[in-house]
Amino acid sequence: MELKDFSYDLPDELIAQHPCARRDQSRLLLLDKNKEAWTDLFFFHLPDLLRNDDVLVVNDSKVIPARLFGRKPTGALMEILLLTQKQSSESSQIWEALIRPAKRLRENDVIHLGRNAEAKVLVRLSEKKWLLEFFAPDGFDSYLEKFGRAPLPPYIKRKKNNSPDITDLERYQTIYAQNPGSIAAPTAGLHFSEAVMEKLRARGIRIAHVTLHVGYGTFVPIEVHDVEKHVMESEYYEISRESAEMINGARRLIAVGTTSTRTIESAADQSGCVRAQSGWTNLFIYPGYRFKRVNGLLTNFHLPQSSLFLLVCAFAGTDFIQKAYRHAVENRYHFYSYGDCMLILQD
C-alpha cells in the first residue's frame, strides 16, 4: 500500500486560520457509509442526526500552553514546543522539547524567555528532540499559565513576537477538556457548544469520556513509501470503569475524533469488549484494519498522506473518502484543526 495513494489537492485558502465565530456554526458533511452518499449540513444539526440510544465517546484531554518563544544571548529568536515533562522540583522543571531553529544550538546554551525565565539546554536526544531545564521566578507552571501559547500546528500562521492570543488559548480547547497533557487539540471536539451538549442530553444521547494525551506523533509525517512500515509515537490513554460500561452497552458507538477512535480500538478485545484501563498506545489504523467497536466517526478534514487521513479511509473506504474530500473542496469547506467536520454513520 503506497503513501501516494492517500493524497488530494487542497487550495491554501481553504486551510482555516481562525475558528468559526461560534463553535457549533461550523459546517458538517454527513456521510452515509452504506449508501456512499453525503449531505451538507451544520454542526448544530448533530443531535438530530443521532439516535436516542447512541453513545458518543469524547477525548477530554486538555491542551497545555506548550508553545514558547525565547532568544539566545546572540539575539536569535527560538521557538520551543514542550513535549513531555520528565522531572519537576520547586526551582525548575525538565522537559523533552522541540526547538526551532536548532542548527547551531549546543549543550549548556541558555535561552532567555523573558520575565527572568530561561531554559538551559541539557542534552540533544535526537535529530529533533532536546532535553531542557526551565527556571522561572514564580515557578514554571505559573510562567507557562501566563505566557505559554496555544501549540497551534504549523499551517496556522501567527506572529511570533506577539503576546499569547487569548482567542487561541480558549478556542484551541474543547469545552469538556479536563485532564491536562496534550500538545495538540482533539480537534473534532472543538465544534461542541453548551447548547449542542444540552440538546444531546435532552434527547437521551449519552456521552462517555476517555482520555488520550495527544503527543508529538500528531506532528510527525509519514515518511515511508510503504504505509505499513510507518511507526506511530506512543501516547498515554485512560478509560474509566463508568465509560467502559457505557461503551460496552452502546448499540451504536460514535467516536468523536481519531484520538477517541484509537483509544477505543486500543482497549477493545477481539469481541469488541472494552475494560477500564490505562496505558500507552501506538496503534496505527490504515486501510485493511478491522474495527472492533467503533460504529460511527465524527472527524475534521485532515492533511493528505497523514496517519489521520489514513484512519478515516480505513473506516469509510479510500475511494468514498477521496470523493467526499473532493466535494468538500469544491464546496469551499474549511480544512484542518480550525476547519469544518464530517460525520460518518452506518446503520
Image (cartoon, helix red, strand yellow):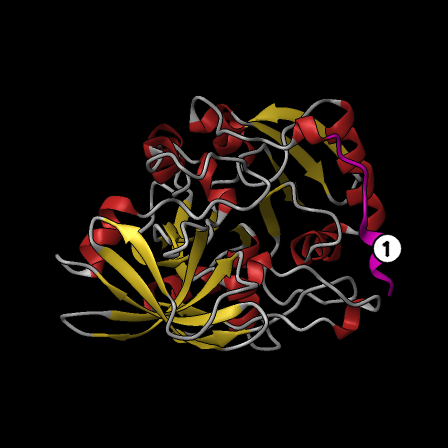
Instruction: Evaluate whether residue 212 shows in this view.
Output: no
Residue under numbered circle 1: 4
Depth check, front residue: 155 or 27 = 155
Q: Is residue 15 magenta?
A: no
Depth check, front residue: 230 or 311 = 230
Q: Which quarter of the figure has residue 222? A: bottom right
Of the residues shown, which amino acid type is indicated by label 1?
Lys
User: Image check: 221 left or right of 338?
Assistant: right
Instruction: Give the x, y percent position of residue 159.
Output: 46, 34
Residue at 83% over, 69% down: 226
User: Image check: 76 left or right of 146?
Assistant: right
Instruction: Evaluate whether residue 80 shows in this view.
Output: yes
Depth check, front residue: 65 or 194 = 65
Mainly helix, strand or loop, the magenta region? loop
Instruction: Give the x, y percent position of residue 127.
Output: 59, 72
Q: Which quarter of the figure has residue 32? A: top right
Residue at 74% over, 48% down: 304
First to last magenta residue range: 1-11
Q: Which quarter of the figure has residue 10? A: top right
Q: Quadrant of the N terminus?
A: bottom right
Q: Is residue 8 magenta?
A: yes
User: Image check: 68 left or right of 28?
Assistant: left
